[in-house]
Image (tube, helix red, strand yellow):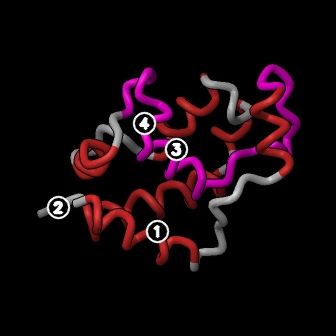
Amino acid sequence: MKRNFWANIGALAVLGATAAPTIAEEIAVVNPTSIPDQARITPFSLVINGYQGYFADRGIPSNGAFQWAIHFKRVDAEKLVRSAIAKGRLSPDALNDQSYLRKVQLMLDRIDRNGGRR
């Protein structure tokens, strides 16, 4: 299952996301209490952080369990975004950004289609 997930990462990169943090993301990590609008973790990085267990304390499992949680609708874009907000990685306005939520959900759907099932 892990191999399927990482195989999807290349396909997700085609969507225009990058894995490297931006300056704004680094600022958000350094000073999470004051997150400027532009200081957002990219949808791609958000999904990768979820997979790697960064949000485990918020009830989001990691690795293969992350894929299964997506498949069984225990993790969706909104839950992932709420977790990032709680950890200071996103500003609360991200919940109202339908484009951002759609991009996150698109990546989660891609993981489910190609790696969340045996």
Residue at figure coordinates x 83%, y 31% from the top left: 35
Task: Measure how far apart labels 4 and 1 are at the Cα level.
Answer: 16 Å
Look at the image and give the residue range highlighted in magenta: 31-60
Residue farthest to the left, as pictured: 118
Q: Mark 2 points at which residue?
A: 117
Residue at figure coordinates x 84%, y 46% from the top left: 24
Q: Where is residue 95 in the image (x, y as percent from the top left)?
A: 63, 38
First reached walking from the N terminus: tag 3 or tag 2? 3
Q: Quadrant of the image for the N terminus?
A: bottom left
Q: Name the residue under label 1.
A: 9
First reached walking from the N terminus: tag 2 or tag 1? 1
Q: Is mark 4 on a helix, strand or loop?
A: loop
In this rendering, the label closer to the viewer, 2 or 1? 1
Query: Decide: marks 4, 2 in contact (CB < 8 A)?
Result: no
Task: Measure how far apart labels 3 and 4 are at the Cα level.
Answer: 6 Å
Label placed on residue 53: 4
Task: Measure how far apart labels 4 and 2 are at the Cα level.
Answer: 20 Å
First reached walking from the N terminus: tag 4 or tag 2? 4
Label 2 CA crowd tier, 10 Å (few <14, some 14–19, many 20+):
few
Q: Is residue 9 above or below residue 67?
A: below
Tell me the kind of residue under disc 4.
Answer: Gly
Q: Where is residue 55 in the image (x, y as percent from the top left)?
A: 47, 31
User: Was residue 36 drawn as part of the magenta stretch in this picture?
Assistant: yes
Tell me the kind of residue under disc 2.
Answer: Arg
Residue at figure coordinates x 29%, y 66% from the top left: 3
Q: Mark 3 points at which residue?
A: 49
